[in-house]
Amino acid sequence: MAYANDSIRIAKRDSILSEITGAQMPQKSLKILSFGAKGDGKKDCKPAFDKAMKRASQMGGARIIVPSGEYLLNGPIHFVSNVCLELQEGATLKFSPDPHYYLPVVKTSWEGTFLQNYSPFIYGYQLKNISITGKGTIDGNAGTTFATWKSQQKKGQQLSRDMNHKEVSIEERNFGEGFYLRPQLIQFFDCKNITIEGVFITNAPFWCIHLLKSENIICRNIRYDAKLVNNDGIDPEYTRNLLIENIEFNNGDDNVAIKCGRDNDGWNTNRPSENIIIRNCKFKGLHGVVLGSEMSSGVQNIFIENCTYGGYCKRGIYMKTNPDRGGFLRNIYVNNCQFGEVEDLFYVTSMYAGEGMDNNHYSEVCNIYVKDISCKKASAAAIVLQGTLAKPIHHVTFENVNVDKAGIGLSFSNTETISIKNCNLGGYVGIPSTASQKDNLFNKDK
């Protein structure tokens, strides 16, 4: 089995790129200071942002300009269509850490299950042409409250999964106060034509950017220092036609985690995450790029290329599912990526967390093409493929994978049709030396 022809891969990628335009930018503008905002870090500016959004809607769209200053927000910003929120250099949106400000609950999702929960801090539902641009900062300021909730979330987490499996109506899945399910910093849900560009993101309550059931999106030149609990960088879920480029990640969890619903919700939604291009990024955090584990609607047509690292990642590329999930991971292309020291460079498992082994919702994992990737050290393993007896991982190609040092080079189980070409895992072996007389075993007993 040969590596997927480069020209075919490039043509497929470029066809997807031709469909991605991001948001149409509005021509008219509004100044947030005109609505009573004050960048002194003390005055509650939420009413001003609410008024500006309302006025922009009445105008058919506008650019809301936020100049330098610190703007306290006692509650979320709810977007309307055809709006660009422009955070100029020196501008900081600083959200209150008080959970009460993010009620009443809104339609959202939590770890792959649809439900109603605290509002994300920046939120849009069923909108089009929305954007966040500029060199300003979005500070979730969540360290004293939301970041402490993980130890208390088990009750709400388990209830949400039970409701998912029992297919309880979304209207009855009411969470919020008392359940400790942390909201996302930015979530656009069922939206089209989105651009997020240039901003600096820090101190998120949970995932930083959650792109849920949305399409035609550009995430570009974003910078992170987001190290609170589960501060994933970008989480596309049921999302298609997405370009992620020139991002400097520095996250307390996954840099990019491509998801597609958990279990019953994923199967019933039946909308894969697809046509996603990740390029020219610097990875730093728990994992570089992750597919899963919530992926029950399937993930396909993913391109990861020309990326490097800004620091440590536990795993470079990580694909994970288990027999609870079903769905598929297929048509994955990884090209020209470099890492420093990792635990595992490339890890694919159909047995994530050992969950669901008594179930029979096996995932299909296939058509993975890896070329020209490297790392300086993989302390655990360079390449791991873990399929299942019921559905082995199949049709995977590795070409020009180079790892200077590795605890284990290859670990394959339950796999079929695997191709390896020009790979050095754990170092390089040079030209063999010529045997001398003293090396001759037959002479040693004489």
Image (cartoon, grey):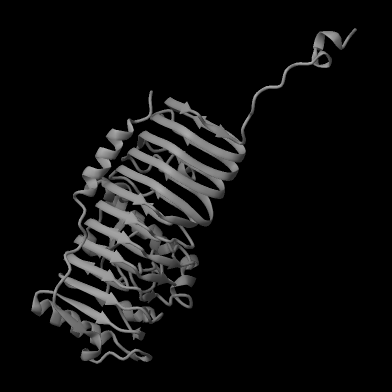
Residue 272 on image: x %, y %? 26, 46
Residue 443 sits in quarter: top right
Q: State whether residue 15 is above or below residue 416.
A: below
Q: Residue at x 60, y 40 (%)?
A: 404
Q: State whether residue 254 is above or below residue 274.
A: below
Q: Nearer the viewer, residue 241 or 115?
A: 241
Q: Residue at x 75, y 16 (%)?
A: 435
Q: State whether residue 368 is above or below residue 143.
A: above
Task: Tell which residue pokes out farthest to the right in this image.
Answer: 446
Mark count: 0
Q: Residue at x 20, y 67 (%)?
A: 130
Residue 206 on image: x %, y %? 40, 66
Q: Nearer the viewer, residue 113 or 137?
A: 137
Residue 88 on image: x %, y %? 31, 78
Q: Nearer the viewer, residue 271 or 25?
A: 25
> Does residue 146 appear in this view?
yes
Q: State whether residue 149 is above or below residue 360.
A: below
- Which image quadrant: the N terminus? top left
- Which image quadrant: the C terminus? top right
> Does residue 191 appear in this view?
no
